[in-house]
Image (cartoon, rainbow, N blue to C red):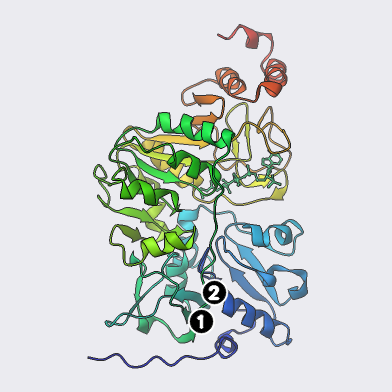
Amino acid sequence: MALKPIKTVTPDEAIKAVRSGDHLHLSSVATSPQCLVHALCRRGRTGELADVHIHHLHTEGPAPYAGPEFEGVFQLDSFFVGPNVRAQTQRGFADYIPVFLGETQKLYREGYLPCDVAMIQVCPPDDTGLVSLGTSVDATLAAMESARCVIAVINPHVPRTFGDALISLDRINIFVEDDTPLETVHFAAPDTVETAIGRNCAELIEDGATLQLGIGAIPNAVLSQLGGHKNLGVHTEMFADGVIGLEEKGVINGAKKVIDPGKMVATFLLGSRQLYDYTHENRLVLMKDVGYTNDPFLISQNPRATAINSALQVDLTGQICADSIGVKHYSGVGGQVDFFYGASRSPGGKAILAMPSVTSQGISKIVPMLLPGAGVVTTRAHAHWVVTEYGAVNLYGCPLQERARLLAGIAHPDHREALDRAAFERFGSHFHFVKK
Ligand code: COA
């Protein structure tokens, strides 16, 4: 039976569905529905709207609704502070909801947060009337389930991905067409420090491991060192271009996975156009709800689950700050705890924190104490492996003084003496008698 033609409206028409006081969810990362964002802001400038709450994970592209121009009109309370809203969040115009990434869906499904209007971006329908959420399932599916109105941008650049990404046209109330290319990011080739970190991580990754890699330069540096590995799998919250070559070479084949064997599982994707083309109609890639990808108990069922994430600071006892620089919110809790906890419970699993020993300004990231106001994302009881360009240490099972000694040993040589001194002051003269 032929499908009924879809009636589309302009973005400005679609945005009329938004009412004052509504809570809106925007689809995330590369699929941020930019034509709706701009129409929403145009309407916001008319004075017709007040007290509209906006929620989303990290989004790419402009986010003008977060700025002071829209005070009283829009209030952004995001689940992750991405680069496009960081300055406004740090200035207090926008705010952040601390939440494990895996539980962002629960906020909607269990009614902690209302969702009145979900704004999503999908690929054109197939001949059975299914569209795909493409590169972003995350909390967007849950937002749609509870929304009074779902506005979908149909965009041919959205890849047709499978898993929970496939949804029926009848779950959508208003359609808009757009063919603006999706946002892309290109990660620079790893520098010498990142390459050394990648090598140190690769030595910890065993054949048959199921990988989770976070966002940024270090994950790519790690992947670039895995060409000689065998039977790797992927169960992660996101992946970027680095996995493509490894899958094509057969290094990533998911053969040892217990959960979704043979498949690469993620909840969002961010990378180049090549990545989006790779995932289009690719049955090896399963895009799943974030409550599934980031469930620590499910993650732990894959053997040798190995999670690699980064941090802003680690103190000498192993407390990991990954979301703020002092009181300034920089990013979010994200999936770090979901995956560290899941990996540490998996048979042969490893939770690996990988970061350069110093910032671009030469400030040590291993510190005696976190900056005042810094948030602990991963507690010292959850911390296991810490890797810098100077080596890898495992804090799990170690007492505090041993941790301080291990961490000072992988700090930048310029900072080791000061860290040693700080540990001595903290733990007393016994510290130096701990095995060197
Ligand atoms: N003191 C002062 N500034 C610091 C700092 C410190 N200890 N550590 C980092 N910075 C600055 C850096 O200099 C850099 O600024 P610049 O861009 O002006 O040079 C900026 O903060 C970012 O640091 P960088 O080390 O480049 O961060 P990154 O891009 O590698 O990301 C996290 C690191 C921790 C922010 C990122 O991994 C994250 O958001 N994690 C939280 C969530 C998570 O782990 N999710 C799971 C995977 S998605």
- The C terminus is located in which quarter? top right
The spot of residue 250 in percent (x, y) is: 28, 45
SS for dot 2: loop
Depth check, front residue: 13 or 185 = 185
> Residue 212 got which mark?
none
Q: Quadrant of ligand 1?
A: top right
- The N terminus is located in which quarter? bottom left
The spot of residue 213 in percent (x, y) is: 45, 45
Residue at image position (39%, 54%) is: 293
Relative vertical location of residue 71 with respect to residue 330 in this rendering, above or below: below
> Disc 2 beta carbon < 8 A from ligand 1?
no
Q: Which residue is mark 2?
A: 33
For the residues labelled 2 and 1, say whether their Cβ atoms are less than 8 Å apart. yes
In this view, which residue lies farthest toward the top?
A: 433
Q: Is residue 138 visible?
A: no
Dot 2 or dot 1, earlier in sequence: 2
SS for dot 1: loop
Q: Say few, some or many: other residues with alpha carbon within 10 Å of mark 1 (under 14 / 14 to 19 / 20 or more).
A: some
Residue at image position (43%, 63%) is: 276
Quadrant position of residue 81: bottom right
Left or right: 383 as drawn, with respect to 349: right
> Disc 1 beta carbon < 8 A from ligand 1?
no
The spot of residue 391 in percent (x, y) is: 53, 25
Relative vertical location of residue 113 with respect to residue 172 in this rendering, above or below: above
Q: Which residue is mark 1?
A: 178
Q: Say few, some or many: other residues with alpha carbon within 10 Å of mark 2 (under 14 / 14 to 19 / 20 or more).
A: many
Residue at image position (27%, 47%) is: 253
Quadrant position of residue 134: bottom left
Q: Is residue 74 visible?
A: yes
Left or right: 364 as drawn, with respect to 200: right
